[in-house]
């Protein structure tokens, strides 16, 4: 095998699910996810069960969403706010730690908006899971959140490693 062929083969290693980021980056991503999980739970408690939650609709108060009525408006609002707090936390930690070696294109606010938009689908998973399993099936909202966050994590890694922060060598230089 020629040197050029060996180099191309080496560069292609690890492109699968890790997209060339390496195990260390994945473990950092996992650690950030664990911290974001804690942020999500803390924010959910803050907005659902703490005294601060009194500014939100009461527990078990219905919310008419037009096409459907949700039986617990506070549960819906608290789960959305908690997920958004975790998304913002993850973005800044990924920017400064997980993917710190990757090239940054554009303004920080633009990247935050891009990450927030891309996280909408992954965020919808725990929101839907908690509201379907808890409100419709009687599962504890904390257990339902765990299931949703686990599924959302898998989607988040794939999206982040392949689309938001791909390896710098995979992205063409953008002209200034």
Image (cartoon, rainbow, N blue to C red):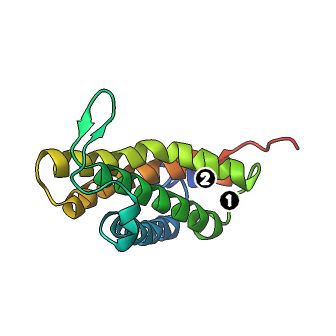
Disc nearer the start of the sequence (1/2): 1
> In the drawing, does residue 150 fall left or right of residue 7?
left
- Residue ID for mark 2: 165
Q: Quadrant of residue 59?
A: bottom left
From the top left corner, tell me how far across and down residue 92 is, in percent. Answer: 60, 64
> 51 and 173: which one is in front?
51
| SS for dot 1 | loop
SS category of the residue bearing label 2: loop
Mark 1 in CB contact with mark 2 (< 8 angstroms): yes
How many circles with numbers are drawn on the protein? 2
* Depth check, front residue: 75 or 117: 75
Measure the C-alpha gap from mark 1 to mark 2. Answer: 7 Å
Q: Residues within 10 Å of mark 1 (few under 14, many from 20)?
A: some
Q: Which mark is residue 113?
A: none
Image point (20%, 62%), residue name: 143
Q: Residue furthest top?
A: 67
Image spot of residue 36 (x, y percent): 44, 67
Q: Is residue 17 visible?
A: no
* Res 40 quadrant in image: bottom left
Badge 2 crowding class, 10 Å Cα cut-off, few under 14, some 14 to 19, many 20 or more, is many
Which residue is under mark 1? 102
Name the residue: 36% across, 57% down.
78
**x and y, in percent, of residue 155 in the image:** 40, 48
**Position of 148 relative to 120 (above/below):** below
Can I make out residue 113 in this image?
A: yes
Looking at the image, the residue that sits furthest to the left is: 138
> Up-down: is 77 above or below 64?
below
Up/down of 71 relative to 46, above or below: above
Q: Residue at x 22, y 59 (%)?
A: 141
Left or right for 164, reference 120 = right
Q: Quadrant of the C terminus?
A: top right
Task: Write the residue at 60% across / 70% down.
Answer: 97
């Amino acid at each position: 095998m020629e040197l050029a062929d060996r180099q191309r083969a080496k560069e292609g290693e690890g492109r699968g699910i890790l997209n060339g980021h390496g195990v260390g980056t994945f473990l950092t991503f996992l650690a950030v996810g664990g911290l974001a999980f804690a942020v999500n739970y803390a924010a959910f408690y803050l907005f659902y069960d703490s005294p601060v939650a009194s500014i939100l609709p009461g527990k078990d108060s219905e919310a008419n969403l037009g096409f459907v009525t949700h039986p617990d408006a506070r549960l819906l609002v608290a789960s959305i706010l908690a997920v958004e707090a975790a998304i913002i936390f993850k973005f800044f930690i990924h920017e400064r730690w997980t993917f710190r070696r990757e090239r940054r294109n554009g303004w920080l606010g633009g990247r935050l908006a891009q990450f927030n938009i891309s996280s909408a689908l992954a965020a919808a998973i725990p929101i839907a899971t908690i509201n379907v399993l808890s409100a419709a099936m009687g599962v504890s909202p904390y257990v339902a959140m765990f299931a949703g966050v686990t599924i959302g994590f898998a989607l988040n890694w794939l999206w982040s490693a392949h689309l938001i922060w791909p390896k710098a060598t995979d992205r063409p230089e953008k002209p200034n």
